[in-house]
Image (cartoon, helix red, strand yellow):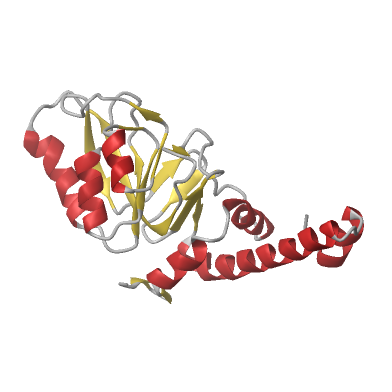
Amino acid sequence: MTNHEKPGVNFDVGDVCARFSVVYTGAISDVLDEMGFRHQVLPWEIQGLTLEHRLAGVAMPVEGQPTESRDPEEIFVPVLKMLGDLKPGDVMICQPHDSVSAHFGELSAESAKYRGARGAVIDGGARDIDYILNLGFPMFCRYRTPRDIVGRWKLVSYGQPIQIGQVTVDRGDFVVGDKDGVLVIPRDITLEVLERSEGVMGAENLVRKAILRGVHPLEAYREYGRF
């Protein structure tokens, strides 16, 4: 799978996606807290279309704004350009600054999946839910609505930093989502966070086994440093 490069940082996206896909967000969030990154979890209202939806991939930030324009060149062309620029391993993550429209639908999901994207996260709405579910494309959003963007919303930039809640998202950051929600890992610490999170899961497995053997929870915590 294509590598995503940034000066001084490089990793194999396919390998990192595969490893993060089996690490739960609770462990990752704990590691980020311990490293001093305490504002990396997106607002809790952003949830998967189903509890089974999981995603892990490289952030493609997208930003939009409300509009009354119905001009196809202004409404559709920027969205199509963005979809065409997605790379394998990307996760589209959108700050629409809007709570009215569906900012992602079935054809967008088809396009994104074909280009190798691993999911979408929207601080806004989605539609065509049955089609997206049948497609098996991981989607996290705030709400669902049939309302189209024409005359209501337009994309204004992509690949540039965005803000969702307290989280700043840059191109190349890493996005992980599961049943508990979605968080963003700064690109420069992605590999360190991954390795530490895998270590946390290993330690928690030892705590779990100890408790099931009858070890007092406090003793298990003292021994393995996790609970």
Residue 104 appears in the figure: no
Name the residue located 37 percent from the left edge and 33 percent from the top edge.
124
Q: Is 40 left, or right, of 65 in this rendering?
A: right
Q: Position of residue 113 (x, y in %)?
A: 26, 54
* Figure label count: 0
Residue 30 appears in the figure: yes
Quarter holding residue 6: bottom left
* Quadrant placement of the C terminus: bottom right
Q: Position of residue 146 (x, y in %)?
A: 26, 25
| Front-most of residues 148 and 9 | 148
Q: Position of residue 178 (x, y in %)?
A: 51, 48
Q: Position of residue 201 (x, y in %)?
A: 66, 63
Name the residue located 22 percent from the left edge and 44 percent from the top edge.
108
| Front-most of residues 67 and 197 | 197
Q: Is 90 left, or right, of 19 in this rendering?
A: left
Q: Residue furthest front?
A: 213
- For residue 27, above or below residue 140: below
Name the residue located 66 percent from the left edge and 54 percent from the top edge.
30
Quarter holding residue 206: bottom right
Q: Is 23 left, or right, of 78 in this rendering?
A: right
- For residue 181, above or below residue 215: above
* Quadrant placement of the N terminus: bottom left
Name the residue located 26 percent from the left edge and 33 percent from the top edge.
128
Q: Is 27 left, or right, of 206 in this rendering?
A: left
- For residue 116, above or below residue 62: below
